[in-house]
Each structure stands twice: as structure tokens, then as C-alpha cells.
Amino acid sequence: MAALSPFSPFLPNWQTVWDSTALGWLKTCPKLYQYQMLDQWEPRNKGIHLVFGGLYAASLERYAHAKASGLSHDDSTRAMVRWAMENSGDRTCLHCEGAGEIEEGDLYPECPECNGTGQGPWRAWDPSLNPDGTPNPDANVKNRYTLLRSLVWNVEDRALSPFTTLIRANGKPAVELTFNFEAFSIDGEAVSLSGHLDEVVEAFGQRFVRDDKTTKGSLGAQYFAQYTPNNQMSLYSVAGKVILDTPVAGVLVKAAQIGVGFTRFQTAQVTRPEAVLTEWMHDTEFWIRQAKGFAERGHWPMNDRSCFLCSFKSICKVSPSHREAHLRQDFRVRAWNPLEARGDI
């Protein structure tokens, strides 16, 4: 069943269900938000770091689900590695060169770009190339071998870690939780916050939302400082308190430094005092109210102070009348909907 629309039925370009991704786009630049959330453009080349990080997080979800279902550590590890092997291709059909969606566990799906006539085989992951075929300068660091190595070492390290998965009141493990709760009302219309928590764990006598990250940079206090303040971590902290109806200290971030011959792990507590979360909620209401104003005026202004880190910089630097052609050349259409659930609450 298709997910419901996250937009207002009364003001179609005003979003009333928000996740950290969409809120982050808006805070960075309203024009960026328009491109990605409203017009549904995303770069054709996500870059090897996003591809690697996505496969890493999704694979660890398989381990957590398998372990929570009662499988042993070894069997859960096998399930994770199998999924990672089956899905670590570049998802390009050799028949039509189109990039389509792969069903979980299906090595040879039908390609939606050519209506099923180009059913597999799909290219294996060539670590020397980015998804768009351009050279990958980090091929010796981000490749299938280092992905599988990091995954296996992660769960082996996890077995020695001082945290356990929270078992909720209904007897289910707190793994891959989808949340959606009403946060406040703007001009009489309810606004909700939505998203997904990988896991809630108990550690050090407290409860934390757990989140995995990857980096090729060094780990330490400077690395973890980027998460305070941080939009995603603040939402996770709020959501953990709301959906579990119990105190949550913050987020337990487990970072993996990926090197050519090593993967190094470090875990840090990213906490949020109650007063900081209250302030974040007030600021979030302000930003979403701003979005309503942009939608009413039909104008999403460019924040050119953020262009240095934006994938749409090449679009915004050309004349508005030429942007559509550039978008079609370098970007593809893919909708983002915070209401697409991956778990249950």
C-alpha cells in the first residue's frame, strides 16, 4: 500500500509531516528543500560514501532483526552478510543502462526502467568507479571487501559491548522503530514529526537510541562533536522519549573508521538536556512555520551561504530559465516521503 502524503490537503506545497532529512534540507537552504522535497530531484551520482554508508546501515538492520527474532549470533551474521553480498551492486541494468530498485534478496529483479524486458544481470559493484561511472578516488577504502569486513567486525565488537536491546512492554525488541507523532499545531493544522530509529538499547544504567556511522577520518572527541548540536540526533532524542514513554538519555553513536587495512570502532554518548530539546522543538516549529510562508508565496529563497556544501550548486549558478535542462541531465526524479514505514510501533 502506498504511503499517505506528508503534505497539507489545504496547502499542497506545505509539508505537515517532517523527518530529520526534510527538516535538514529546509534549514540548509529553502531552494535546496524545493529541489529535493517538492520537485523530487536527487543527484544521479550519490557518491561512494553515501552508497557505502547506506549499505552498511541497511546490512546492520538485518543483523538486528535476525538477532531479535531469536537467531544465534552466527546465524544473524550470516543473514547480514548474505544481504550485503546480494545488494552491493551498482543497481544498473546491463540491458537498458537504467538504474532501478532491487527487491530485497533478489539478485536478478526486473528492471522498471525497461518494463521488465531487461531482467538482469545487474552489474557487480566495481569499487574503482562511483555509481555514475566516474573514478572513485577512495576505491581502496570503500569497496565490497571493506564493507563486509566492517560489518562482521562491527557485530563481533557488538557482542562484547555493554549494551542490550530494549524489550518493550509488548514483548517486542525495540529494533527498527518507525515513529510518527503530533508535535504541535500551526494555524489550526497538526504538524507531525516522523522517522526511524535503528534500535533502542540499555547501557550504563540508561536508555539510548543507537545509531551507526561510518567515516574515513579519525575518531575521537572532534569527530563526535559534530553531533552536538545536530538536527538528526535531537529528533532521535525527542522521538525516543515520546514513542517509548520513558526517559531516553540521548543517542549512542557507534562510529566505524574505515581504512585500507583496518576498521576501527568507537562509541560515544550524544546526550541532550531536557531544556535543549525544548528549545529545539520551539525552533523546529519556527522553521516549519517559515516553510508555510514560503509555500503560500510560492517562493523558496536561495541561501547562498550554504552553496559550498550543496550538490545543486551547479544548478543554481545558471540562469533560472536553463535550470530544468541541467537538472534533467545531472539529476533524477525520486520522491522522498517521511511516511514510508520500515518497521512498526
Image (tube, rainbow, N blue to C red):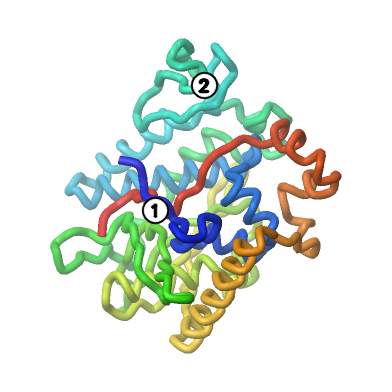
Instruction: Name the image quarter holding the C terminus.
Output: bottom left
**Please, what secondary structure does the residue beneath circle 1 have?**
loop
Q: Position of residue 117 (x, y in %)?
A: 46, 10
> What residue is disc 1 on?
339
Q: Residue at x 43, y 69 (%)?
A: 191
Density class for disc 1 (Cα within 10 Å; few <14, some 14-19, many ≥20) is many
**Image vertical order of residue 42 relative to residue 199, above or below:** above
Q: Position of residue 143 (x, y in %)?
A: 57, 35
**Image vertical order of residue 143 relative to residue 249, above or below:** above
> What residue is disc 2 on?
113
Whole-angstrom CA distance, mark 1 to mark 2, is: 25 Å
In the rendered structure, which disc, 1 or 2, sits on the residue that comes first in sequence? 2
Front residue of 256/233: it is 233
Task: Kindly check if marks 1 and 2 are in contact, taking CB atoms under 8 A apart as contact.
Answer: no
Q: Disc number at residue 197?
A: none
**Please, what secondary structure does the residue beneath circle 2 have?**
helix
Instruction: Name the image quarter holding the N terminus.
Output: top left
Q: Residue at x 85, y 44 (%)?
A: 318
Density class for disc 2 (Cα within 10 Å; few <14, some 14-19, many ≥20) is some
**Residue 159 in view:** no
Q: Position of residue 275 (x, y in %)?
A: 48, 89
Q: Residue at x 55, y 26 (%)?
A: 99
Which residue is most to the front?
A: 10
Front residue of 287/47: it is 287
**Image vertical order of residue 126 relative to residue 37, above or below:** above
* Residue type beneath disc 1: Leu
* Residue type beneath disc 2: Glu
